[in-house]
Amino acid sequence: MEGQIVDVEYDDQQVDMCKIIAQHTDHYTVKPLVYDPDKYLYKFSHYTFQVPIESISGFYDTMDIEDTGQYVKVDGVHYRSVEDSDPEYELESGDSDSDTCSEISLYDENDYEFE
């Protein structure tokens, strides 16, 4: 089990990709994959923590994070997400009764007026 890539689901339904460091009778010791804002890349944290066995929500059946199809190795420590989204961007929780998804226009309406 050591080295296995897994998803850990927490009580708040958040899911983190982690690497199993050690297996115990009722829990795993894992290292989470974390975002490194200095490099704009991901890496496995040097901190470990213990999670109950039942909090493992998925096994990737690999020890290589690249085999998950979600990350590409950049160097010996860092990985780049294959998604193009910005990991620091979070949608603002707004009024769900809004008629539009965005309040900001990327172009001026006057540029596209018909005469």
Image: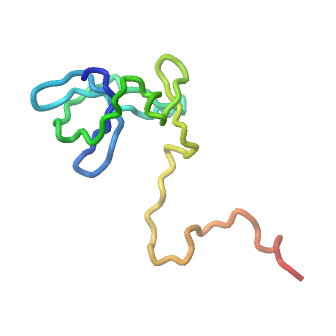
In the shown orientation, is residue 110 left or right of residue 85? right
**Where residue 77 sits in the image (x, y, percent)?**
46, 20
Hey, which residue is sitting farthest front in the picture? 61
Identify the residue at the far left of this view.
Answer: 25
Query: Where, by quadrant of the figure, is residue 58 drawn?
Result: top left
Q: What residue appears at the point 54 percent right and 33 percent down from the top-left corner?
A: 40
Residue found at x 76% / y 68%: 108
Horizontal and vertical percent position of residue 45: 36, 26
Q: Measuring 48% from the left and 58% from the top, which residue is drawn there?
A: 91
Given residues 55 and 94, the one toward you in this image is 55
Using the rendered view, name the quadrant where residue 10 is placed: top left
* Colour scheme employed for the rendering of this structure: rainbow
Residue 60, given in percent of the width and then of the height, sits at: 35, 33
Residue 38 in percent (x, y) is at 52, 30
The outermost residue toward the top is: 76
Q: In this view, does 42 lie above or below 92?
A: above
Point out the image quarter for the N terminus: top left
Q: How many marks?
A: 0
Q: Residue at position x 54%, y 42% from top? A: 83
Q: Which residue is more in the foreground, 26 or 112?
A: 26
Quadrant of the rendered structure where residue 50 is? top left
Instruction: Give the camera-side residue of 93 and 23.
Output: 23
Which residue of the protein is positioned furthest toward the right in this rendering? 115
- Quadrant placement of the C terminus: bottom right
Q: Is residue 82 above or below residue 20?
A: below
In the image, residue 1 sits, relative to residue 82, either above or below, namely above
